[in-house]
Amino acid sequence: MDIGAILGLAAGGIALILLLFALAGVRVVYQYERGVIFVLGRLIGAKGPGLFWVPPLISRMRKIDLRTVTVELPPQEGVTRDNVTVGVSAVLYFYIVDPNDAVNNVLDYYRATVQIAQTTLRSVIGQSLLDQVLSNREEINRGVQATIDQRTERWGLKVTAVEIKDVQLPATMQRAMAKQAEAEREKRAKVLLAQGEFLAAQTLADAACLLSTEPVSLQLRYLQTLTEIAVEKNSTIIFPLPIDLVAPLTTLLRQANDARAAGPSEGPVAVPADVPLVLPPAQ
């Protein structure tokens, strides 16, 4: 084999090695990722997205996901300010703002964030009353989110929200709260019943005052009531006769008795004009 062939093979081998060396440094990063590059242990920075080249063998790249991370925190037991033991579970949402700080300032940003979220949640529960934990969840969520966001800012993270998922109470406390809720409902029912009776009595009093001003309307109401109760033909109805109907007859009888006691009358007995003449029905 001549020297030219040997040189050709050597050149081809060197070219192949250079090609492999060049391909070894090619990196591809997706749109939602960034590649944090270290060259000889020195932080170069984050690159991406897309295709780029880094020096092989002397560089190291770590991919960081920039999408929002959802972490479901396990139930955290804590004692409220009024000495009630509760278990609170929550959901944490965060994403990476600065990939360089997430890699360079903390060993494991995911684990560190979860741990700080759990301790902060227990701390906030210990500073709150039970009624606040049950009713003012939005305020507790904002307090926990602000505290975690402040502590993780150096790690290049942004905590967007913390949502309390569930609150577990002791069995004795659940029974006590159930009794309290039942007593509250009974109180409301009695108050509503008393208010209804008061309004009904007030309405009846107003109606009585209105009817007392017009005696004719009272008689019409009486006749209407008779018409309504007379629908049932197989019922026996006993009702009193209004005094307004018998008052003229009583006056007439009193005048007749007075005339008889005075002696024979010289003329016919005068009948008041307002006394109606009632004739017996024809047989």
Image: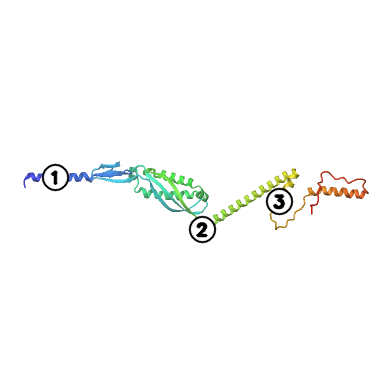
Q: Give the left or right position of residue 231, taking residue 127 as reference.
A: right
What residue do we see at 36% from left, 49% from top? 110
Upstream in the sequence, badge 1 or badge 3?
Answer: 1
Label whose residue precedes the other's in the sequence (3 or 2): 2
Point out which mark residue 75 bears.
none
Colouring: rainbow
**Where 206 sits versus 86, above or below?**
above
Residue type at tag 1: Gly
In the rendered view of the protein, which quadrant contains the C terminus?
bottom right
Q: Which residue is mark 1?
A: 12
Report the mark closest to the observer, 3 or 2: 3
Q: Amino acid at mark 2?
A: Ala
Judged from the image, the secondary structure of the residue bearing numbered disc 1 is helix
List x then y, in percent, for residue 197. 66, 50
Q: Residue at x 19, y 44 (%)?
A: 19
- The image's mark for residue 227 is 3
* Residue 90 position in % (x across, y down): 44, 50
Label 3 crowd bin: few (<14), some (14–19), many (20+), radius 10 Å:
few
Q: Residue furthest front?
A: 283
